[in-house]
Amino acid sequence: LVPLGDDAAVVRSPKGGLVLCCDPVVEGVHFLADTPLSLVGRKAVNRNLSDLAAMGAAARWLLCSVVAPKDFGRARLLKVLGGVRAAARAAGATVVGGDVAAAAGPLVVTISAVGEAPPQPLRRDALRIGDTLHVTGPLGGSIAGHHLRFRPALREGRWLAQQAGVRAAIDVSDGLLLDLQTMLAASGGYGAELASAAIPVRAAATRLSGGAVDRALERALRDGEDHCLLFSVQRGAALPKGGPLTQRARRPIGQVVAAPGITIVDGAERRRVEAAGFEHRIAP
């Protein structure tokens, strides 16, 4: 029903659509060697649940694969798995299986998540000109601890998928600009205008920028691992009252336009920006 190229796949089953995704966390890439192991397990689960949230799905079942260094030890492994189970319980999901292997490389924890699809799953390729753009949470500075302790926006995603005026959504994992560009390209090559004053900046981004407003904004645009939802609302549509969204999430940060590219608008000043963020690159 939703093929390769979105936050998750949606497939048919006899009792309705299932949403499927699979994502690893790798030592040295997604966490450091001294990260508490329960937080490693938690992050592995919540990265996947954020992808389910972007589709508007309800989390149901998880499989967990751990590839650990040969001298890792059972006690440390149990701390990882404790974090996995705690994150699953918090989301109402169940760990139903998996496997453990030993290797010479770094610790890698991979979660495969299965959720129940809403009648109309949210997609990243559904933007249209005139749509307003919104985010469910603040952005930037995730390295200060948010990247380990974020809460997947499952309630928000399920609620958004029920609203007729909501068109598209994506998990902000690689940075606002890069994930927005992914949506724009998937939707036909549109562009976007973002109002700098409307972009919610996490306090940690300001702190890491020494209080410099311009540098904090750049972090909000590019840092990544925010794991909130970027979503669009059809022009002229109003989100109903109630639900899990904050008032800040209801206010737009920008809009979709016909001309390709992303422009930051600050009063009378307009500047084009490169869609850069966190990218995993594999050498050719």
Image (cartoon, rainbow, N blue to C red):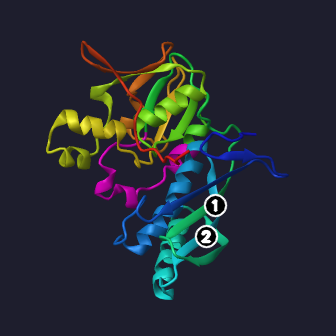
Compare marks 2 and 1 and give the one earlier in the sequence. 2
Left or right of residue 11: residue 145: left
- As rendered, which of 20 and 120 lies closer to the eye? 20
User: In the image, residue 39 lies at what x, y percent?
Assistant: 41, 68
Q: Residue at x 48, y 17 (%)?
A: 260
Secondary structure at badge 2 equals: strand
Residue contact at pointers 2 and 1, CB within 8 angstroms = yes
Does 32 sit left or right of 237 as displayed?
left
Residue 15 seen: yes
What's under tag 1, amino acid-wise? Ser
Q: In front: 254, or 224?
A: 224
Position of 167 with respect to 137 (left or right) is right
User: In this rendering, does residue 166 appear at all?
Assistant: no
Image quarter of residue 192: top left
Magenta span covers which residues?
A: 136-158
10 Å crowding of disc 2: few (<14), some (14-19), many (20+): some
> SS for tag 1?
strand
Give the residue furthest to the bottom: 74
Residue of label 2: 65
Q: Position of residue 161 (x, y in %)?
A: 60, 38
User: Where residue 112 is drawn, which disc sits there?
Assistant: 1
Give the amino acid type for the residue marked by disc 2 in the picture.
Ser
Q: Magenta stretch containing residue 137, yes or no?
A: yes
Q: Residue at x 40, y 24 (%)?
A: 254
